[in-house]
Amino acid sequence: MVKKTSGPRPSRNVALVKGINKLSRSAMFSKRFTFVYKRNVTKVEKRMASAMTEKEVGGDKNGGKRQVRVKKMPRYYPTEDKPRKLRSHGKKCFKDHKRRLRASITPGTVLILLAGPHKGKRVVFLKQLDTGLLLVTGPYQCNGVPLRRMNQVYVIATQTKIDVSEVKLPERLNDAYFKRQSLSKPKHGEGEIFDTAVEKYSVSDVRKEDQKIVDAQLLTAMKASPYMKGYLRTKFTLQTGDYPHSMVF
């Protein structure tokens, strides 16, 4: 009687050369008689099996039974595919993201803008909006920067601060307030034939009023420091031998 050896059994397939075996994969499958006790059912086959059902069919030459769908396919299909939301695998939507703010940015901190039409100018940070963007202003009477939103990635926070504890902002200053306006364009068949003028953006009276209210409060708070107005009017520039990474703002 042959003694059973402990440990893994050696493979019954012999390697002819490196990477090529004597018996193929299907030959080894039949040699192990796996098909007798194991049936490989894929997920697609399971899904298809639940989608079909057996139905008795009349007639002598129809076989008596037939596989039909549990749920009938639609007779008509839309001409265009509807966009569907992809699975995010547990990721949250943008509106559910947690808004973080750099520790160096607090209300009243003077920031240096690094992008946009006002890049290089110094502005005052007022508050963070629901989308995470920063609400800043020049103020407008000082350096021409109106109330606008800014991403904190494109600003440098300085150590200079203004006391804005007494500044009261209008409640309507939110993300919807800064939403881009949809300007109308002339279409063929509407209005006059030669009316080709495109509607241009103009600042609303509401924005002008809010800007005056905020500017008046900020200019009052800036009077505590005699050099603050001149500091905000000066643009940030780099000259030969200036290295931003070694500067203290």
Image (cartoon, grey):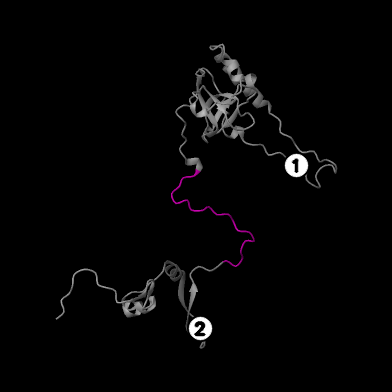
Return the disc, 2 or 1, that comes first in the chain's sequence: 2
Height in image: 78 above or below 112? below
Badge nearest the viewer, 2 or 1: 1
Residue 47 pos. (x, y %):
44, 67
Which circle marks residue 58 in the picture? Answer: 2
Magenta region = 74-93
Nearer to us in this view, 224 or 121 = 121
Query: In the image, what residue type sits under mark 1?
Result: Lys
Residue 7 pos. (x, y %):
21, 68
Nearer to us in this view, 2 or 143 = 2
Residue 82 pos. (x, y %):
59, 56
Q: Is residue 60 left or right of residue 21?
A: right
Q: Which residue is mark 1?
A: 185
Q: Residues within 10 Å of mark 1 (few under 14, many from 20)?
A: few
Query: In the image, what residue type sits under mark 2?
Result: Gly
Kindly report the secondary structure that dominates the magenta region of the rendered protein: loop
Name, please, the residue furthest toward the front.
241
Residue 88 pos. (x, y %):
47, 51
Residue placed at 43% from the left, 49% from the top? 90
Q: Secondary structure at mark 2?
A: loop
Rounded to the nearest angstrom, the CA distance separating label 2 from label 1 is 65 Å
Q: Secondary structure at mark 1?
A: loop
Q: Is residue 2 left or right of residue 142?
A: left
